[in-house]
Image: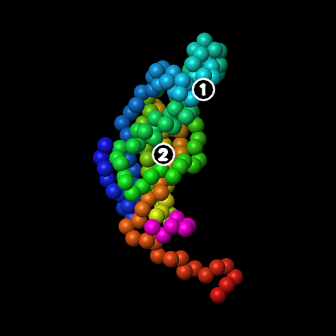
Amino acid sequence: MLKVSRYFEDYIVGAERRTTGRTLTEADIVLHAGQTGDWFPHHVDAEWCATQDFGQRIAHGTLILSVAIGMTASEINPVAFSYGYDRIRFIRPIFIGDTITVTARIAGTRDHPRRANQGFVDEQVMVTNQRGDVVLSLVHIYLVERKSPAPPDDTPPPGGD
């Protein structure tokens, strides 16, 4: 993995990257079920799934989330770390044999409210299947060091002079 120090000021809103594809297998689903304890039938029972509207086994949403974020992890940035995820939506099911691709776009940056030497970077992550349908969407939030501290906010409080 490539090690790159990318500071808050280096992120450009609108910059985008796209991964290669990754095909989900039955082994992926079974391994994830074993790791999480989620053996619900819509993931592992082919006969039961055949009687449902979706007709076949579907991958766990958390599996797709984990794989997708892993697919975007192409470099180690020692001045940033993952702060969390917002607005996670599992939009469409992923079936065994589906191939996902991930697009990550810098959606915005903002100051940290209490740390002048850090800021937040929001990355909009869209996961699509082999037909181009969006199957998962989320915002990945990074806490990133600044090259130099943010200037103080000199805005007077509301109602004050």
Judge the density around disc 1: few (<14), some (14-19), many (≥20) Cα neighbours within 10 Å. Answer: some
The image quarter containing residue 39 is top right
In magenta, the rendered stretch is 112-117
**Label disc, if present, on residue 38 of the rendered structure:** 1
Position of the N terminus, as image quadrant, is top left
Evaluate whether residue 132 shows in this view. Answer: no
The crowd level at tag 2 (other Cα within 10 Å; few <14, some 14-19, many 20+) is: many
Q: Is residue 151 above or below residue 32?
A: below
* Circle 1: element type: loop
Q: Nearer the viewer, mark 2 or mark 1?
A: 1
Which residue is pictured at 37% across the width and 54% down the height? Answer: 78
Residue at position x 48%, y 63% from top? 119
Which residue sits at x=60%, y=26%? 38
Q: Amino acid at mark 2?
A: Val
Quadrant placement of the C terminus: bottom right
Magenta: main secondary structure equals loop
In the rendered image, the vertical position of residue 17 relative to residue 130, given as above or below: below
Instruction: Kindly indicate the quadrant of the structure image that contains residue 20.
Output: top left
Viewed as shown, does residue 161 lie left or right of 13?
Answer: right
Mark 2 or mark 1, earlier in chain: 1
Tell me: residue 138, above or below residue 47.
below
SS state under label 2: strand
Q: Which residue is mark 2?
A: 125
Instruction: Look at the image and say whether residue 111 sits in the magenta stretch.
Output: no
Residue 68 shows in this picture: yes
Q: Are marks 2 and 1 in contact (CB under 8 Å)?
A: no
Q: Residue furthest top?
A: 47
Q: Disc 1 marks which amino acid?
A: Asp
Report x, y in % for residue 15.
Answer: 39, 54
Magenta stretch: includes residue 113: yes
